[in-house]
Image: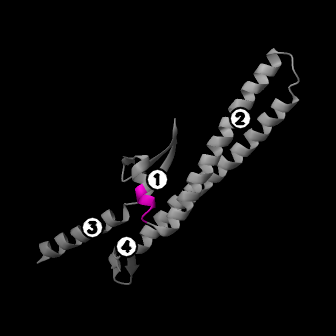
């Protein structure tokens, strides 16, 4: 009888830990953010599919993608204005216009990129929060006048 109880408790603990271990973690990498779920690296397609499962996370994820697109466009314009500056400098033409364009596109691009990263972080946090609400069973430490132990929390 004791073996059955111990085996059941161990099985419930393993089940509750596997249910809670589905959160997504993001780390900055060499070529952008890397996403992991349970020590498994996720591709962009996988993370996009996962984010589409949660309504709240999907809204922030879509905002992040749009802001990132705006940042890429502003970065491309920044690159072009940098080339424009170099060409005018070599040809001894006025460089005021290219300098202003370079500074403005750089500033706009950084705003878009910052907003994209903020929305991406918010989407991941919202997704992780939604997972915490769906678990139906947890093992929590408890203590009372009878001693210290583990309790199942539903």
Q: Which residue is mark 3?
A: 15
Along the viewing direction, whichever of 43 and 67 lies nearer the viewer: 67
Q: Say which residue appears at 74% left-offset and 40% top-offset.
A: 105
Q: Position of residue 29 (x, y in %)?
A: 51, 39
Label 2 with label 4: CB-CB less than 8 Å: no
Instruction: Determine contact: label 1, label 4, CB under 8 Å.
Output: no
Mark 4 and mark 3 lie on one chain; the one further toward the N terminus is 3
Judging by the rendered image, the residue that carries numbered circle 1 is 25
- Tell which tag, 4 or 3, sits nearer the viewer: 4
Give me the C-alpha separation between circle 2 and circle 1. Answer: 32 Å
Describe the element under mark 3 as helix, strand or loop: helix
Task: Give the quadrant of the N terminus.
Answer: bottom left
* Residues in magenta, as a range: 49-53
The magenta stretch spans residue 10 = no
Within 10 Å of the Cα at label 1, are there few (<14), some (14-19), or many (20+) other Cα atoms? some
Question: Looking at the rendered structure, which numbered label has been put on residue 135?
Answer: 4
Q: Position of residue 119 (x, y in %)?
A: 59, 57
Quote the CA–CA distance across marks 2 and 4: 47 Å
Q: Quadrant of residue 99?
A: top right
User: Mark 1 or 4 closer to N-term?
Assistant: 1
The residue where tag 2 is placed is 78
């Amino acid at each position: 009888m004791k073996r059955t109880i111990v085996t059941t408790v161990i099985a419930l603990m393993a089940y509750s830990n596997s249910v809670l271990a589905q959160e997504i973690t993001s780390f900055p990498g060499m070529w952008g953010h890397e996403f992991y779920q349970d020590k498994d690296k996720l591709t962009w397609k996988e993370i996009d599919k996962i984010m589409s499962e949660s309504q709240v996370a999907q809204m922030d994820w879509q905002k992040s993608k749009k802001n990132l697109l705006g940042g890429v466009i502003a970065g491309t314009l920044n690159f072009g204005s940098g080339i424009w500056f170099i060409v005018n400098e070599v040809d001894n033409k006025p460089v005021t216009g290219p300098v202003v364009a370079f500074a403005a596109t750089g500033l706009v691009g950084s705003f878009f990129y910052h907003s994209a990263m903020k929305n991406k972080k918010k989407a991941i946090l919202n997704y992780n929060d939604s997972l915490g609400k769906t678990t139906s069973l947890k093992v929590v430490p408890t203590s009372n006048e009878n001693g210290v132990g583990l309790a199942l929390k539903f």
